[in-house]
Amino acid sequence: MKMTMSHKILAKHAGLDQVLPGDIVTCQVDWSVVHDMFFNVDGQDIYKEIDHLDHPDKCIVLLDHAVPAPTTRDAIGAVYAREFVKKHGIKNFIDVGDHAVIHQAMVERGYAAPGRLIAGADSHTCSAGALNCAARGFGPADVTYLFCTGETWFTVAPTILYRLVGELPPGVTGKDIFLYIAGKYGDATGMNVEFGGPGVVNLTIPQRQSISTMCAEINAEFAIFPCDERLVSFLKQRGDTDITSVEPDDDAEYYDVREINLSELTPYVAKPDFIPDNCVPVSELEGIPINQVVVGSCSNGRIEDLAVVADLLKGKHIAEHVRFIVTPASQRIYLQAVKNGIVETLVEAGCVVTNATCGCCYGGHMGLLGHGERCLSTTTRNFKGRLGAADSEVMLCSPATAAVSALTGVVTDCRKYIKEGRL
């Protein structure tokens, strides 16, 4: 059949035996999801005109970007969201208290699973591809149509395969894999991105989530990992009993196949203002002063990420002139971090631990930058003005790089500190 994973999922949901790059297909989606910004952004209130949803059982609404509400407008938007789910009988509603960043919620609550097709009102919806499904972001009008009908159309895109071999060395993470890819290969607009090869098994599910999430920043249509034993184990622990994996055909046709030896990778940083073709090894930027460090968001806010930071900070204190903001990706992760002592360690080291929210990542609240300030962050974007003042700078990195740099007060390669036991 010569189909890749993304092509197989589109074909299944379009009721076709096969799809080819360039085909335009109409698909029934498994889940449509929107967050609070769908209800509080001026000029995007098309949802108010909705009178009927064909499949409210396939719709998800959650509050995550502006929680707790930092402005009156956000509070009013949350009221609209609550009224909307009540009006249309939407049972899959995640309100403030047991909330999560949208992409963590999709994984944590069981919505993302192998073979599914997911549409979301957020550009980083491709994050769910870590669980062997096809997920993509849409704009307000498209998502409104999806909520009403349960279907949408796709242009079938060519697929780039990243074939992973080897195992990551100490101090190198999934975030570094993505930053390496973005730096070396640049943009992937109009392409699907898939991952395979013997090295995939060495990546944890959170590392895969980090990579698939960040593929939005190279403009990939879908970003999909295979369903291997590690994912099956994760799914069973989550409580899944019916697992239908999707694998590429042996003769699948790819636009390009790019091999990456994980064992040769080093920590990477995205320089300010954009990501494709703008990422370099940390060693090239060492010594640059920073004012703020952020760890969290849909890219790196899982318990694995927080544990890395806590291990590096334990018994130490961040540099005097540095602010360190830590944001768990969900309230459930936050609770776990409290119970196992991670939050205590972070606070003792001088960090501010926030509730689960997209607030800082999108520049809404919880840690904006002032004039001329520089932030080193594990969040998803770094364009000019993303986190506050237009003349501030945001550089992206892994949790390990962020933690070590917070201690030194300058951009720092974490590997030599780990090897020397200095942290």
Image: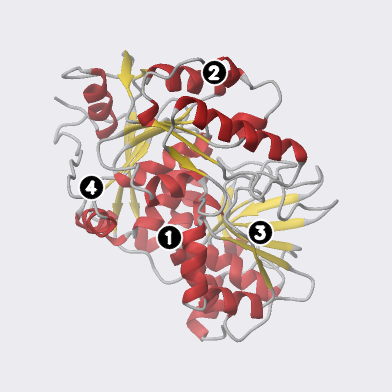
Instruction: Tell whether label 3 touches label 4 (CB within 8 Å).
Output: no
- Pointer 2 local density, CA inside 10 Å: few below 14, some 14–19, many at least 20: some
Q: Nearer the viewer, mark 1 or mark 2?
A: 2
Q: Quadrant of residue 220?
A: top left
Q: Nearer the viewer, mark 1 or mark 4?
A: 4
- Pointer 3 local density, CA inside 10 Å: few below 14, some 14–19, many at least 20: many
Label 3 to label 1: alpha-carbon separation? 20 Å
Label 1 to label 2: alpha-carbon separation? 41 Å
Instruction: Judge left or right: residue 355 versus residue 174.
Output: right
The residue where tag 3 is placed is 376
The residue where tag 1 is placed is 265
Q: Nearer the viewer, mark 3 or mark 1?
A: 3
The residue where tag 4 is placed is 227
The residue where tag 2 is placed is 141
- Pointer 4 local density, CA inside 10 Å: few below 14, some 14–19, many at least 20: many
Instruction: Tell whether label 4 touches label 1 (CB within 8 Å).
Output: no
Residue 227 in view here: yes
Give the x, y percent position of residue 105.
Answer: 44, 48
Q: Nearer the viewer, residue 93 or 182?
A: 93
Give the x, y percent position of residue 250.
Answer: 14, 36
